[in-house]
Image (cartoon, rainbow, N blue to C red):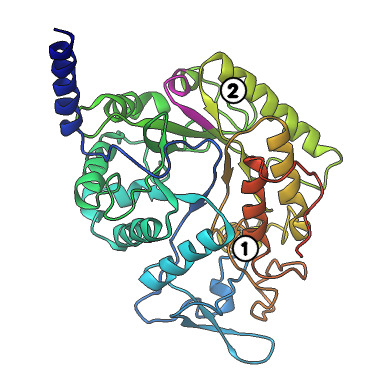
Amino acid sequence: MKCRIFAFFLLIGIGAGAQTKHSLNTKFPSYKGLVMAGYQGWFRVPQNGIMYPSEEQIGIDMWPDVSEYEKTYPTGLKLADGSMARFFNSADKSTTDLHFKWMKQYGLDGVFMQRFFDAARPGNRKRVETEILKNAFDAASRNERAIAIMYDLSGLKGSGEDCSLLIDDWKYLVDSLNVTNQKGTHTYLFHNGKPLVTIWGLGFPDRPYDIRNIGIQRFIDFLKNDPQYGGCSIMVGVPTFWRDLNADCIHDSYLHEIIKQADIVMPWMVQRFTPLLHNDMDRYRDVILADMKWCKENGIDYAPCVCPGFSWHNLSRRAFRNDVKPVESIPRQGGRFYWQQISTAINAGADMLYVAMFDEVNEGTAIFKCTDNPPVSDIAKFVGMDGKPSDQYLWLTGEAAKMLRKENPLSFTLPERK
């Protein structure tokens, strides 16, 4: 009798499993113990084949080291030796392959692929953004790096638009790109035993949408409960001061209602802390400790955000001509500021980290290989590497992963390379 009952429930389990579109296994069953970064992949060569044709059109504050790229493209800028400065193209498969090769080489566990709201629109799903996504999932599988979708609500308008199209987009990614069931090694990031999907952009006061009117609850319900495409864990990207509903956050308790339905909360901490203020790491620590206490009380995991620095001089020069920001407003200090955040977060009890960002040279937060030899310009200004090797931040990120997993002892001192 007991055998028949067991067989009955086993058949039920098999039937339920057959309904889901997701793989039942992955190399990465939990975010815990991992260092993940955000990946933009938005650097595209225009039709004329020339990236940044003039110094007036520069909107990035760091220049990538392109010495290892299989394909590079001309710009209208010159290096100090008079040679042409060249740039990469995110749409090249070889570019994506190189980036994921670096992740494996240096020990970055993986990335969240940014999926912006505009790219998720039905008419845009076959644009280059989706091809870049496909290349990334293939490269992640080959290099055994964790990868997951991060829906960025940037581009969502406040004029009656809502998150319903993200439901259809998730179905498209699952069916057409097999994001949760890759060919080869399955590396989609799971958490609590389920595929992890991030929704970023909730609670920021500068957004044109009201979180009460964008159908976010319907999207969350779908991701959690749909019998075929659901069964997912959710991470929400929110402002630094989400817990107090203050400062950089909207004053609406509905945000807390949304967060309590998530599995992980990840506060966006870029520009909120700086090495230029005395004991600012104490403030960073206190925010993390209080956040983690709130999360523990509400049964939610917590992923603090770390970044190497910040700069958006060239972008602000183009966008806000009357309010141009200084170069490297939050200095990197050769990696010291980055390591201060990493060690402070781990010492506070963090068991996962989110790095902003892998390739974000627009705001000077990139950790991939950049150069101390950017183009020469009287107009555009660039953040350098402080005399450090181009791979300094990739190497530090790998060291952070070892320290997070207690493979190396906790240290507040910037490690030195041997």
Structural distance between the alpha carbons of marks 1 and 2: 31 Å
What is the quadrant of the N terminus in the image?
Answer: top left
Q: Which residues are magenta?
A: 257-265
Along the line of sight, the residue nearer the viewer: 224 or 187: 187
What is the quadrant of the C terminus in the image?
Answer: bottom right
Q: Position of residue 232 (x, y in %)?
A: 33, 31
Along the line of sight, the residue nearer the viewer: 231 or 252: 231
Amino acid at dot 1:
Arg
Q: Residue at x 40, y 56 (%)?
A: 140
**Residue placed furthest toward the bottom:** 82
Amino acid at dot 2:
Leu
Left or right: residue 198 compared with residue 65 = left
Asked whether residue 244 is drawn in magenta, I would say: no
* Disc assigned to residue 59: none
Looking at the rendered image, the disc whose residue lies closer to the viewer, 1 or 2, is 2
Q: Is residue 161 visible?
A: yes
Q: Residues within 10 Å of mark 2 (few under 14, many from 20)?
A: some
Left or right: residue 111 compared with residue 21 = right
Label 2: which secondary element: loop
Q: Which residue is mark 1?
A: 317
Q: Which residue is mark 2?
A: 245
